[in-house]
Amino acid sequence: MDREPLDPCTPIAPAQTGIGVVTPFDFALDRELWRWVPARVTLHITRLPYLPDPVTVGQAAALGNPHGVRRATRDLLVPQPRAVAYSCTSGSFVGGARGERALVDAMLAAGAPAACTTSGALVRACAELGVRKLAVVTPYVDEVTDRLLAFLAESGVRTTAAIGLGLLGEIWKMSYADVLAAASGLDTSGADALFISCTNVPTFDLVAPLTRRLGIPVLTANQVTMHAALRLAGVPTGQIAGYLPGEAALSAPA
């Protein structure tokens, strides 16, 4: 039986690739995550329960509790994402390499087909780029920043210079000017790359201009997280240093 020709004005929905994202309760940059993925990818985002604590090591440890992350992951599995990302830098480095691995294991145990964390994604990005020396900007108080530097050292990455801005809350209210000022005040001369920590720090439009200004790769928390998640989901991205968001990512070499 012949079928009636399809009206050329009728839209055809493309096949979509889903990625689950577990974020802290105060995550406020949903749009920035979406900007890092191509149009055929959809993000399924859930937040961990509210904590009344300031941004300290204690809060990071609570956010990085594998049991809570496992429960949150279960909430994401109904739309069948191809991968799940735990999108929180401090929560994934506060327990060291063992703590980061426990979070990945928790997501996999919950049923995620593949899983990554922000801090694990950073280590993989450094390995991909051959980065052994890293300059670091964080919004955190010193005790939290120190945990990040210890995690990097444990992962074979030496910190050449670091600055923490001492914020105990409302990190998402940082402006691009705040981030640029912090990066400009850091000596990056001995670094292979710069990392701007925290998924609640806005950075999307700063990566390219900062890379040109500094002459070294600029890595950010949301950038490395989405890059790792896309790869786990089977979406080509190219090398992270030249990673282009949007549709361009679909034609980049895997």
Image (spheres, rainbow, N blue to C red):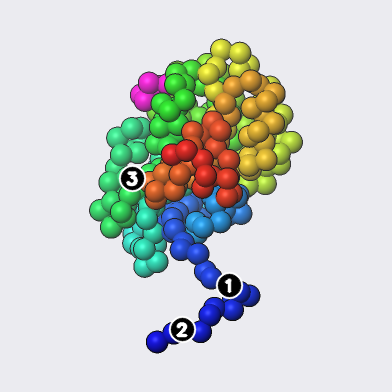
**Residue at the spot x=46%, y=83% of the render?**
3
Mark nearest the camera among 3 and 1 is 1
Q: Is residue 104 visible?
A: yes
The amino acid pointed to by label 3 is Leu
On the image, the x and y values in percent for residue 222 come to: 53, 43
Judging depth in this view, the residue of 40 and 2 nearest the camera is 2
Magenta highlight range: 153-157
40 on left or right of 109: right
Q: Residue furthest bottom?
A: 1
Q: Residues within 10 Å of mark 1 (few under 14, many from 20)?
A: few
Real-space Cα separation, disc 3 to disc 1, in angstroms: 40 Å
| Left or right of residue 102: residue 200 | right
Residue, disc 3: 103
Helix, strand, or loop for circle 1? loop
Camera-side mark, 1 or 2:
2
Q: Position of residue 162 (x, y in %)?
A: 56, 22
Q: Alpha-carbon distance for marks 1 and 2?
A: 18 Å
- Please identify the quarter of the rendering in which residue 17 is found: bottom left
Which circle's residue, 2 or 3, is located before the other in the chain?
2
Judged from the image, the secondary structure of the residue bearing numbered disc 3 is: helix
